[in-house]
Structures are given as structure tokens and as C-alpha cells.
Image (spheres, rainbow, N blue to C red):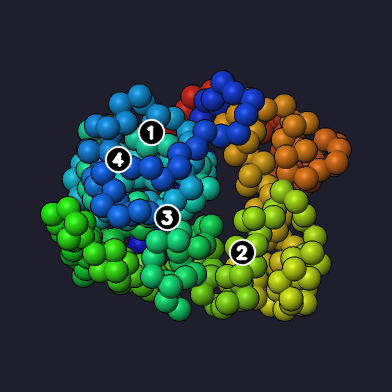
Amino acid sequence: MSEVCVPTREVTDTPLPSDGPIPGFGFNPPFAPVPGFEITDLAALHARMTDGSLERIHRVDFHTITLITGGSGEHAVDFVSHPCRPGTLLWIRPGQVQRFGHPGVMNGPHLMFTPSFPAHLPGTDRPAHEWYGPVCRQLGTGRDHATLATLLDQLRAESTRPPGSVSPQILQLQLATLLLHIDRLPQDGETGDRRAGGEIYTRFRAELERSYATTRRAEDYARHLGYTVKTLTRACLAATGQPVKQVIDARVALEAQRLLAHTDAPVALIARRLGFSEPTNFGKFFTRHVGAAPGDFRRGHRGPGTAATAS
């Protein structure tokens, strides 16, 4: 049975010397057999990214799934440092802020794919387009670990066939099997079961990811999606235990924390980027949802530090 990693405290990171957005990587691997898909391993990834960018805070616009098979270390995602050891499964989704551990301390298959690559099946559309889900699971050496390792081996075997013989359709179907298996692993009790919200919640989360910096009004999301606020609230309560307005505000607060901790952008600029007309309104919002003023939060994440492990 898998165990979802539960964080015990935050990661503190030195912000990047930039007033622009958090640095990001688009999907452009040099050895991808088909567009939108690549599978390699952590050692090979570090070997080709020798500028140290993996060990600095960044975000990607594609999915990465990693199964640790050797060594141990940590992987930091959105203020949480996750301990990694053989049997650890990591799934980083587009837009999440991350930092890899030191190269050479752990290894395992590392899968990368764009949100549009998986086959469009009822069971795969939601996990392929979710902006957030369990980042880290400790699978141990049980049946789930063996199954996922086998599925990743099959993906690698297909992707390394001779040039011209790699089948995108086979890769899509193999990836769908992998995603469906991961999706049925036990959910984290702290984040709820996103499957319970159904298609309504899935559509809402996709729209929220597109529009959180434009509007925080539940009425705007309901009107755009063709639902009522009450319907969105029911879906959010089923999936997360929180009403729709809290889900919206939590997404905005997370992005505010990312920008304050990992960039040198002035608070006023961050406020404008997130749709606040006045920095004072942003300050009140941030303090209410995070429990600290923006300046205090930023100062608390200035210095380098280590995080307690999530067990």
C-alpha cells in the first residue's frame, strides 16, 4: 500500500536575483522520439543540464513523473522538501515550482510529457490536466511499485526502438495505463479526493489555472463555465472539503507565496500581476490567507535553509 508524503515544515529558498517571473522550462528535450513525450533517467537529465538550473528554483509547463530506484535525497516543490528513497514516486505538474536535489545522489526513470500528449480517455483527461495533486508517494517495494516500474520499463522500451518505428499511439496507451494506475492509488486525506468532484470540478480547476490572476469572483467562473455558484461549491466541497471561494483564494495565495519567495519582484508588481488594484488590498488578502504580511513572508524565505523531511 502506498503512503502519501506528509510535509512537516516549509522549505526556505534563496530567491533568484530577478524581478521577473519565476524561471521556467518549456518542453524541448533533445532526444524526444515523438513530440510531447520523453523518458530518460535522473542521471542522464543532470548530465545534460550542467548549468545547475535544475538545482535552482524553476517551473516547467509539462508533467514529470519520477520513480526513485537508487540512492536517496530530496526534491523541493512549493515550499515543501520531499524525502526521496527507493520506492518514492514524484509527480510534478505544469506550473508547480520545484528544485531538484544535488546530482548523483539518487537515480530512477524520469518521464516527461505535455498535457496534450496522453490519449483522450475518460479516466486520463482529468489527471493529465490537473494543476495540482499528490506530489510524493512512498510506494515501498510492494505491488504498486513493481507495477509502475514495469510500466515505465515498457514506455522506455517503446521509446528506444529504432528511429521511425516508435509508435506514438502505443506510447499514449502505455502512458494512459500508467496514469490510471497512479490515479487509483490512495488519496491524501489532507487534500481530499479530487475525483469526487467529477467533471464539474475538473473543468473548474482548469479554468481556475487559466484565470486566477484575472478574477477571484466565484460568479465569474460559474458564468464562464455555465454552472451556478452553488453547483461549483458542491463540486469543490466533494473534492476538497472547501467551498469554491476558498479554493480560488488558495490558488491565488499559493502563487503570491511563490512570487514573494522566489523572485525579487516588488510587492506592488506582484499585486498587479495577481489582479489586485491596490497593494494594500493584496496585503490584507495575503495576511488573511497566509498568516503573515507579504514583506514578513518574503524576509522569512530570504536565507538559505533546510527543511525537515516529509515522512
Q: Residue furthest left?
A: 162
Check disc 2: other Cα within 10 Å, few if <14, some if 14-19, many if 20+: many
C-alpha gap between disc 1 and disc 2: 28 Å
The residue at the point 36 percent across, 58 percent down is 137
Disc number lying in front (3 or 4): 4
Residue 78 or residue 297, whichever sits in front = 78
Check disc 1: other Cα within 10 Å, few if <14, some if 14-19, many if 20+: some
Disc number lying in front (1 or 4): 4
Name the image quarter holding residue 297: top right
Q: State if disc 4 and disc 2 touch (CB < 8 Å).
A: no
Relative height, residue 22 to residue 304 (above, below) = below
Residue picked out by circle 1: 54
Q: Secondary structure at mark 4?
A: loop
Q: Secondary structure at mark 3?
A: loop
Residue picked out by circle 2: 205
Q: Position of residue 61 (x, y in %)?
A: 48, 47
Disc number lying in front (2 or 4): 4
Q: Locate residue 80 relative to residue 118 in the image: left or right.
A: right
Mark 2 or mark 4: whose residue is earlier in sequence: 4
C-alpha gap between disc 3 and disc 2: 18 Å
Q: State if disc 4 and disc 3 touch (CB < 8 Å).
A: no
Q: Which kind of residue does numbered mark 2 sit on?
A: Arg
Q: Locate residue 67 relative to residue 137 in the image: left or right.
A: left
Name the image quarter holding residue 44: top left
Numbered tag placed on residue 30 in the rendering: 4
Q: Which kind of residue does numbered mark 4 sit on?
A: Pro
The residue at the point 17 percent across, 53 percent down is 163
Q: Secondary structure at mark 2?
A: helix
Residue picked out by circle 3: 114
Q: Locate residue 76 relative to residue 194 in the image: left or right.
A: left
The residue at the point 19 percent across, 57 percent down is 164
